[in-house]
Image (cartoon, helix red, strand yellow):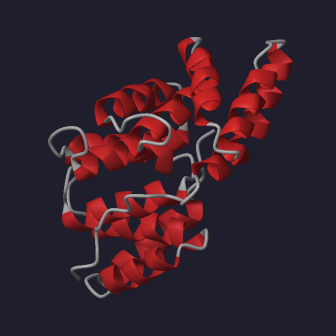
Amino acid sequence: LAAIGRSKPTMQSHYTKLLRATLTASLMLVAMAGAAVAGPLEDAVAASERHDYRTALRLFRLLAEQGNAIAQSALGYMHETGEGVPQDYIEAAKWYRLAGEQGDALAQTRLGFMYEMGKGGSQNFAEAAKWLRLAAEQGRVAAQDSLGGLYVSGRGVPKDYVVAYMWLSLSAAQGDQDSAIQRDLVAKLMTPAQIAEAQKLAREWKPKP
């Protein structure tokens, strides 16, 4: 069971694909609010996609300082990976936290990973679980997978195979094959009654908005 509970350091090789996936809904909210943010945000994403990191950094920073969560999340990622800026985990965590406090699931997941791996400081599994849970409750597959792993190992949370099975099942249901493997390994440690309970929890679970 050595594979159970391992962390996932990355969620996708190209961050802008994830950023684009969350952009549409955010721009809709911006339009409803009548704010003039949609254009600069689209420009920032486009600049990042064509590897014009100087422009992307300038636009993301401008929006991030105005409180835009997507831009804050993007800045966090740029600093975490050293994409267009010197790698700086402390700066990355700062922007992830600001975005995560606004409910950005991507930032919450990345910040959870940073705490889990000890990036920019000491490992803190309790903080990792806190941020991963916030993202997992919104349906973020990588957060569900890693949170399940924490429950298997009892790092930052009480060891609980039922809860672990639930989160791994939810992640597996979104197509994460690794989660399915981990779930099946956990099942070998559980009674039939525990498995039935975990399956019921997974069926009844609904994402938070």
Q: Quadrant of residue 190?
A: bottom left
Compared across the picture, whether 122 is left or right of 109 comes to: left
Find residue 131 and report its image quarter.
Answer: top left
**Residue 105 or 152: which is nearer the viewer?**
105
The percent position of residue 96, horizontal first and vertical second, equals 43, 32
**Percent x, y for residue 162?**
34, 68
User: Is 159 situated left or right of 171 in this image?
Assistant: left
Say which residue appears at 76% left-offset and 30% top-offset.
43
Q: Looking at the image, which residue is at 69% across and 46% down?
A: 49
Where is 131 relative to 185, above or below?
A: above
Counting every numbered tag in the picture gives 0
Quadrant of the rendered structure where residue 86 is?
Answer: top left
Q: Quadrant of the N terminus?
A: bottom left
Which residue is at the front of the view, 29 or 53? 53
Closer to the camera, 154 or 83? Answer: 83
Residue 156, compared with residue 146, is above or below; it is above
Quadrant that contains the C terminus: top right
* Identity of the residue drawn at 25% across and 44% down: 119
Above or below 37: residue 42:
below
| Residue 163 locus on image (x, y percent) | 36, 63
